[in-house]
Structure formats: C-alpha cells, structure tokens
Amino acid sequence: MSNHATRRPRLAAAIAAAMLVMTTAVPADAEPAPSAAPPLSAADSDPARLGWMQGSPPPADKQIRFADGSYFTFPKTRWSFAHFRELVPTARISRGTGPIAPLPEALRPDIAGVTFVPTGGHQPVNWVTAFDGIYGDAVLVLHKGRIVYERYNGVMNRDQPHIAFSLTKSFFGTLGEMMIESGELDDRQTVAHYLPELAHSGFANATVRQVMDMTTGLDYDEDYASPRSAIVKFGTAVGIMPAPPGYSGPQSSAEYLPTIAAQGRHGDRFDYQSVDTEVLAWIMARIAGKPAHQLLEERIFSKLGAEHDAAIVIDRNGMGFAAGGLNLTLRDLARFAEMIRNQGRFNGQQIVPAKVVERLHQGASRADFAKAGYDTMPGWSYRSQWWVTHDAHGVLIGRGIHGQMIYIDPVAEMVAVRFMSNPVASTATFDAQTLPAFAAVADHLMASR
C-alpha cells in the first residue's frame, strides 16, 4: 500500500477502479478517469430514500448486483454495505446458545450536543452533525458498559448487520495473541514453519510476529488507483470482487498468497498489507485443524452473549476473508470492544486473557510505524492488527475502509463503535473529524460522571 495516509484508499477503491475498467470501453493500458462530479450528499444518498432493491422484483434502475460491480459503486454502497451477505458467499459465525449479554441503556441526551474542533480547524462542530455528514450509518457509545448514545441512519437498525471491513483484522489479531498466550502459536517461528505452501514465497522467512504487526517486506502493493495492482488481484482471488471476463488467475487466497515475492527485509518498517492478515489466519487454521473463523466463533464470538449470528465472506475454498470480511450488528461489535476495554472479561467470564489485552496496549515499535508516514497518527504503532495511539488515555483503535471504527478509551471508561458508507475509502480522510470528535465525547463523559 502507499506509505502516506492521505494517499491510501483501500480495497473498495481498487474494486471501484477495476469495475470502471471492466464496465466501460477503456483501453487496457489506460487508467480510469476520476469523476469530476462531487458525490451526492449524505442526505441525498440515503439508501432508504433512494429505494435500492425495493419491489418484487426491484425496478432495473434500483437493482444492485455483485456480478456487474454495482454493489461497490457509490451511492449503492450505502445499501450494499448493510446487505453484503446477500451479495457474496459467507459462512455463519454462531452467537452460541447462551443468553444475550445485556447492554444496559442509560441514554444521555446531552451527548448529542457535544462539540469539537476538527484538527486544523478553528470553529466548533457538533459531533452528531459531523457523523451524519460523513455518511455515518450507525454509531453507539458505551460508558462504563451502559449505552449512553445510539444512532442509526439509512437502512441500518440494531438488528441489521453491516460489513466491518478491516475491523475484521482486530478480531483475528486478538485471536492470534490468544494462541500465543496458550502456547499453540510461536510468534518467533517463520511462516514457512507453519505453512510449507509458502516456503518459496516472500513470506517464507518472515516471522509470525512480523506478519501480525505488518512489518513484512513484500513485493506487494495496495495501490487502489490501479486496476492491475496486487490488491485487485487479491480481491479477485478471495471473491470480494467479481473476476473479469476470461480470468484465469488464482481462485482463492491459498492460490494467491504463494505468488507474492519478497522485497526488502522483513522487520525494517511497518507497511499496512492486508495479505499479512490472511497468512495469520491460515497459520491459525493449520494449527487448529479447522477454519480460522470457526476458531473465532468458538473462542471469542460465541462467548460474548451476542444478539445475532455474525458472518464472514468466504473464498472458493471456504476460507474466511480475515482481512475484511466480517459482518455483524453494531451492538455485537460493541460487546467485543467492551470486552477488550475490560481486559478481556465480559458476560461473566474471562474470554481473552488479560495479558493479551495488556500486550495490545503496549503496542509495537513507534519508530517502525513512523517510517510509514501516517500524518494523522503521530506517535502511534501497530500491534497484532490493532492501531495503538500511545496517548494519555491509552486509546486503542480498530479501523476499516469507508469509516468503520472501534474506539476504546480505558481512562474515560468509554467505547465507541461506528459503521459508515463514506464514498472515500481511506479512513485517514476523516481522521481530522473522527479522532477529536470521539475524544470530545470521552472528555464530556469524564467531566460529567
């Protein structure tokens, strides 16, 4: 991927670029021309108002399909992000058979009035207005385990799942740390030790720790502006995007990952690469002898007292798309985040060992992270698929394209979770609003408790 946060739209932008090439008469060696027209506003692109997929059958101009790529074109994404399971193959991640873990409500109308000053700005802005304006689909704030604010827009509601994109990585990174803690996984071992299939790939002598913290040196790019980039090939292989006519490339992640070569040295720097998460999930699956998403179900999700089953996008081999395929409801995402805030304890049990959560908060090398040039994240690091701020509150963050977020503030005893369908993929694009907005909510809760 690009080394600069402001130049790193992620998987969805790659898909959109590829779809433009596939569905328009453009020379094979030409780059798709960006649209000059600004996107519809949040209000004008409201999916319920636009009536996507309504009717039996829906009118032709209201249909959204996977095969033609329309599912990943704005403003149709405002519907499809909440209906991903209807568009691509997914596997169930069961909530289990136990009772639902309550999330007590202690709604506070005053939170809706919180204001903040965007980074680089001068005038205060209402945080809810800002959330709506950047195409927010759903947001929930917990304080001391109680719901103090909850909002749903468009086609979202508390029972509606939404694709989490790269928030999925944080689930699998946590699972990886659990397997290290239990002694099942040795993060000092090489990838080839666990996966002989990758012995001749660029991953071969990378350690599990380098994969988990994304410090691998690979000949791989997440250049989302090019329909011929590695991320597009990856997306096609795992089935998150349709294959173009005549496609004869890899048909699964297990076929694609061995094609990635080395470039540079492992461990030299942080470089955000989604394929690292896929390798981690494959290693965990190999150790356990079952799909990684089944491990996630058994060891984490089924113990949360979730309200609903989750689901994960699967490739042609039935392997879950660990880099970004999780679909779940907002409240169940909040349960996971609240469990992390409480040092791994939730629903009356220690789900994740406290030592695992402690290691997440410790983070990784800030010097390695700084080499990536993330302007909106000074002093941060990346540890086991989590973004670590190292700020005074010890905030821990999960991030996903188009605005998906987990924000955990241990000092304020606050968790905020968010689903979005912003037309811009890069979450860094709206960090200037998101980060100070959540910090302002946290400060408000601390001042009024």
Image: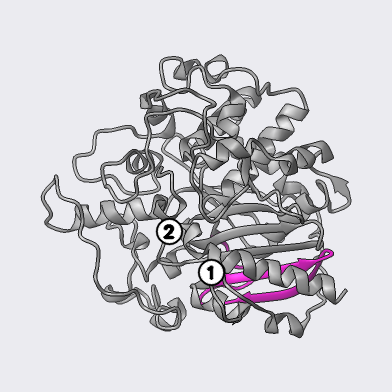
Which quadrant would residue 79 be assigned to in this image? bottom left
Left or right of 108? Residue 91 is: left
Q: Residue 425 — which label? A: 2
Tell me, yes or no, whether the two marked residues, 2 and 1, touch with CB atoms within 8 Å: no
Q: How many C-alpha atoms fall within 10 Å of the one at disc 2: few (<14), some, or many (≥20)? A: many
* Residue 323 image position (x, y, % from top left): 51, 43
Q: Residue 120 — which label? A: 1
Q: Secondary structure at mark 2?
A: loop
Foreground tag (2 vs 1): 1
* Residue 382 image position (x, y, % from top left): 61, 41
Residue 78 among those drawn in magenta: no
Image height check: is 370 above or below 406? above
* Residue 287 image position (x, y, % from top left): 63, 23
Mark count: 2
Left or right of 1? Residue 33 is: left
Image height check: is 13 above or below 433? above
Q: Secondary structure at mark 1?
A: loop
Q: How many C-alpha atoms fall within 10 Å of the one at disc 1: few (<14), some, or many (≥20)? A: few
Residue range in magenta is 137-162
Q: How is the protein colored in the picture?
A: one colour
Name the one closer to the observer, 167 or 373.
373
Label 2 to label 1: alpha-carbon separation? 21 Å
Image height check: is 92 above or below 175? below
Residue located at (23% from left, 46% from top) = 244
Left or right of 119? Residue 243 is: left
Residue located at (24% from left, 67% from top) = 35
Q: Amino acid at mark 2?
A: Ala
In this orientation, does residue 95 appear?
yes
Q: Amino acid at mark 1?
A: Gly
Image height check: is 322 above or below 188? below
